Amino acid sequence: MDRVLPRPLISEDELQHRISELAAEIDRDYRDQEPLLCIGILKGSVFFMVDLLKRVTVPVKIDFLQTSSYRSGTTPGEIRIRKDVDIAIRGKHVLIIEDIVDTGHTLSTVLGLFRFRGAKSVKLCALLDKHKAREVAVNVDYSGFKIDNVFVVGYGLDLDERYRELPYIGVYEPDGDEPSEPSEPSE
Ligand code: 5GP
């Protein structure tokens, strides 16, 4: 069955170019602060994290955290930890790597958790920033692209587990013929 591809918003070349710039910023900032513990938020950050860390030259350790958000009506979702990190956080310089910051609830919870656990420093690197959708203030230390309040897929980002494999970021525009499947909690 043919599928409609999402309308391109950020091309593969634009992504890779910007990711090289972010890696250079991270190298510069963490030159004297190694080792750096990079924690990817599953699953959406995986493509970004791999491309970013292949270009970073300071030594890194990597780990992953998986969260879920449960929304009830219009109430902001309660953030739960589905998979915790394996490496101890205390005393480490932590860099959180995320695909997209939307309302900010996920990242403000995760930042608070790592600070509570005694990280020496906690910074955030997000590929995409839907800054106009923010409900909770979150400081994005390394921001790839600021985007409008649209639903994007590709390059790790999904819609019910589809489209992650696209090498670019596209805007998902439902055409009305999509099969309606139950939604998974967002990750
Ligand atoms: P927040 O807690 O900031 O509202 O949401 C962050 C999470 O929501 C992201 O990690 C991502 O899983 C999901 N999300 C927010 N906006 C989008 C979007 O435009 N596309 C996709 N695929 N996921 C999104």
Image (spheres, helix red, strand yellow):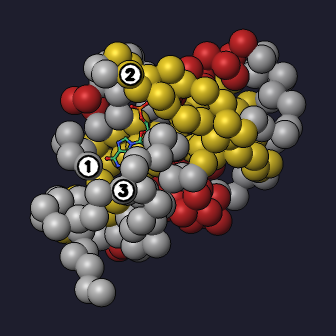
Judging by the rendered image, the residue that carries numbered circle 1 is 151
Q: Amino acid at mark 2?
A: Ser
Q: Give me the C-alpha separation between circle 3 and circle 2.
A: 19 Å
Judging by the rendered image, the residue that carries numbered circle 3 is 181
**Image spot of residue 58 (x, y percent):** 73, 52
Comparing 35 with 2, the one in front is 2
Q: Residue furthest top?
A: 116
Q: Residue furthest bottom?
A: 1
Q: Give me the C-alpha separation between circle 3 and circle 1.
A: 17 Å
**Image spot of residue 102 (x, y percent):** 35, 34
Q: Secondary structure at mark 2?
A: strand
Neighbour tally class for label 1: few under 14, some 14-19, many 20 plus, Cα within 10 Å: some
Taking the image in four quarters, ligand 1 sits in the one at top left
Judging by the rendered image, the residue that carries numbered circle 2 is 72
Residue 59 left/right relative to 9: right
**Upstream in sequence: badge 3 or badge 2:** 2
Q: Is residue 74 visible?
A: yes
Q: Is residue 181 above or below residue 108?
A: below
**Upstream in sequence: badge 3 or badge 1:** 1
**Image spot of residue 56 (x, y percent):** 64, 57
Residue 99 left/right relative to 131: right
